[in-house]
Structures are given as structure tokens and as C-alpha cells.
Amino acid sequence: QVQLVEFGGGSVQAGGSLRLSCAVSTYTYSSFYCMGWFRQAPGEEREGVAAIDSLGSTYYTDSVKGRFTISQDNAKNTLYLQMNSLKPEDTAMYYCATDYRSHLRYCRGGDYRDFDFRYWGQGTQVTVSS
């Protein structure tokens, strides 16, 4: 069973930065894995923020391009999300997710949805004040 635990959420003023971490308990890396960050604000649907595939290719939703950076440390089984120039609209619960089944090969070039991922963390709150 794969378990994910997020760290690093908190409260910050607009323009500030936060770094989220996602520790993966055990993992079998394959040619197909995809790891991603999602967020959900109250009353909103969960949306994909960023993803990284087994080749290291990264994918971002338009609203965070140039501000957020997804990365991974395979030796530590850890996924990161560096968030800079934070805005109040970035306020949400952030979740990391992963899957290694073939349907999500190379994160399907960025064309993925939350229901594509089998394994999820419990979430970490990010609050950005103006």
C-alpha cells in the first residue's frame, strides 16, 4: 500500500513563498508513474496544479506557470512543490497524488484528472492573505 504525507502548508502574505513536500512511504517506480499536486478551495472542484512524470517532464496549470515548480527526489521518495509569488487565489487545501498504472503513462502529456490517481495524501492547507 502506497502512503503519502504532505508537509509544508501554512499561512503567508501575498507575494510570499511556501514549499510543500510529499513523502511517499513505499513506491515501485515504473516507466509509467506520474506524481502530481492538486488543490481544492472551499466550494470549488479539485484542480490539478502540477505534475511530473517518470522522464522528469513537468506540467502546470496556466494559473501557476512561472510561479510554481514541481520537483522530485527519487532517493528520498519525496515530491516537492515550490510556490513563489503566492496570491490569495492560491488559498486551498493542497494534495499530492501518484499512480504508476499504464493509463497515466507520462502523465498523459498533462491531460490528467484527479480520478486518474489511485494514491492520495491527506492534504495540507495553504492560506494566502492579501
Image (spheres, rainbow, N blue to C red):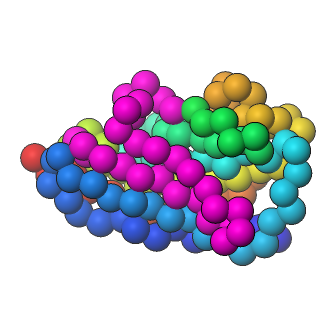
The percent position of residue 67, horizontal first and vertical second, equals 35, 38
- At x 46%, y 44%, the residue is 69
Q: Nearer the viewer, residue 66 or 25?
A: 66
Place residue 11 in its image quadrant: bottom left
Question: Which residues, given as a range, are shown in magenta?
Answer: 60-87
Q: Does the magenta stretch include residue 95?
A: no
Q: Pinpoint residue 73: horizontal percent, then vertical percent.
A: 64, 62
Residue drawn at the location 26% of the way across and 39% of the way down: 89
Is residue 18 in view? Answer: yes
Please identify the quadrant where the N terminus is shown.
Answer: bottom right
Tell me if 119 is positioned left or right of 62 in this view: right
Q: In the image, what residue occupies the spot 71% across and 62% down?
A: 74
Q: Is residue 116 visible to us here?
A: no
Residue 113 vs 24, above or below: the answer is above
Q: Where is residue 29 in the image (x, y as percent from the top left)?
A: 84, 57
Q: Quadrant of residue 102?
A: top right
Place of residue 118 in the rendered image (x, y in percent of width and height, measured from the top left): 75, 52
Q: Is residue 46 left or right of residue 87?
A: right
- Report whether 59 appears left or right of 112: left
Query: Which one is nearer the viewer's eye here, 48 or 80?
Result: 80
Is 69 placed left or right of 36 in the picture? left
- In terms of image quadrants, where is residue 93? bottom left
Image point 33% across, 58% down: which residue?
Answer: 18
